[in-house]
Amino acid sequence: MSEGGISEALRSASDTEAVVIGAGVLDRVADVFADAFGERAAVVVADGHTWDVAGSAVHDRLASAGREVRDPYRFPASPTLYADYDNIQTLIDALRDVDATPVAVGSGTLNDIVKRAAHELERPYLCVATAASMDGYTAFGAAITKEGYKQTMTCPAPRAVLADVDVLTGAPAPMTSAGYADLLAKIPAGADWIVADVLEIEPIDRAVWDLVQGPLRSATAHPAELHAGDAEAMDALIEGLVMSGLAMQAASSSRPASGAEHQFSHLWEMEHLGQDDDPPLSHGFKVGLGSIATSALYERVLARDLAALDVDAAVASWPSWDEVEQGVRAEHTEPGLDEAAVEETKAKYVSADELRERLTLLTERWPDLRERLSEQLLPAAEIRDRLAAAGAPTSPADIGLDAAAFRATYLRAQMIRRRFTILDLTNQAGILDECVDELFAPDGFWGRV
Ligand SMILES: [Zn+2]
């Protein structure tokens, strides 16, 4: 793997100082710990599964290297561990009087629990990854459910991350498929950032862009090999995911790694889609379907000549804020979520004058924008085929979503986050509905769903 890319990324990261990726690197855990935490004692935190997979090995290697190790904290193997605030409180209570640096051995959920608990205990921590299932290891913040709502709670990324490719290739296949989908999502997510950049809404930070997009093409090129357990493909996947997390750290924003495809996922998550499945429907699987969905929308947009967009007509039919608010409240009725959606939508609402300015810019810059988008994007069918090759779901039915709810997501997802994406461009240009109609027409991309 390219050590250069990671060390370059670490220079701009605010929390993470060391990332060690490779086959057999679990053997180096004592050295990695010593470099990051000096003489501190260690306490391994795992669940019943990850303890068997790597936790006990980490504990033993630290101990046999002369490190002071406390009794490990183990969450039960079943039921499946949730990133619920109660679990964070449990861990805080267990570790409060244990004077030691936490070593999280697990994947997304366990890492998020330790990340937030360690922050509340004011201790940096070490993360030992057990699955390449998402890009959150090196990201700031933890996705936690508190009082029924999933939210991103503030907390620093781990000071050091260790990912042994031998361990990762042994993880359950769906976890790797999910991680692949979360990485492939950076292709349409990058397109969304290009849109925001060209329309002067959110400029691209070139250094941060390169962290995500640099390794992306090669890291996502071999889905079938990855699914078959190929170590090299796994190495590339975890590196890409780690780089994305580091980019979010550097940017203090998820923009570099998350666009409209994540808004699809967030909406389904807010509505608890697949949450009661065991294991619950993964982030990556939702994001993967979101990526097919937004890539297909981009195809409808690129089929148009927006240089010839009728700006007067779009401005004339632009709704007032009161009308928009009514629309948001009609689509989002769950208490709490309704107010949040109104607030997010309000943050990106523009006046008719601002809209005219923006759409005029769009018509002027369309040739350049279209070219940059064409270079960035993959065809929706290619995204779908790669996800299928990686073992990830590719249709709404695969994740338990009916066709009508899926179609409605194109309109509803636009309302839940302030981040400007292709959903906003099409909405503001007045073409979102007709593009969606085309996608679901009998000969459209989703015509047979
Ligand atoms: Zn993600």
Image: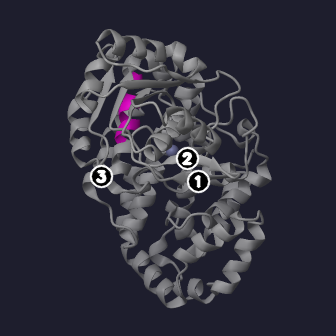
Which residue is disc 3 drawn over? 208
**Residue type pointed to by label 2:** Ala
Q: Label 2: few (<14), some or many (≥20) within 10 Å? A: some
Q: State whether residue 444 appears in this view.
A: no
Q: Nearer the viewer, mark 1 or mark 3?
A: 1
Mark 1 or mark 3: whose residue is earlier in sequence: 1
* Residue 137: image location, x then y, percent: 43, 37
Q: For the point 26% across and 43% down, which residue is it?
A: 9
Residue in front for this viewpoint, 147 or 194: 147
Magenta segment includes 311: no
Dividing the picture into quadrants, the one containing residue 267 is bottom right
Looking at the rendered structure, which numbered label has been put on residue 151? 1
**Residue type pointed to by label 3:** Val
Which residue is disc 2 drawn over? 143
* Residue 417: image location, x then y, percent: 56, 64
The answer to whether mark 1 and mark 2 are in CB contact below 8 A is yes
Residue in front for this viewpoint, 447 or 357: 357
Residue range in magenta is: 233-243
Mark 3 or mark 2: whose residue is earlier in sequence: 2
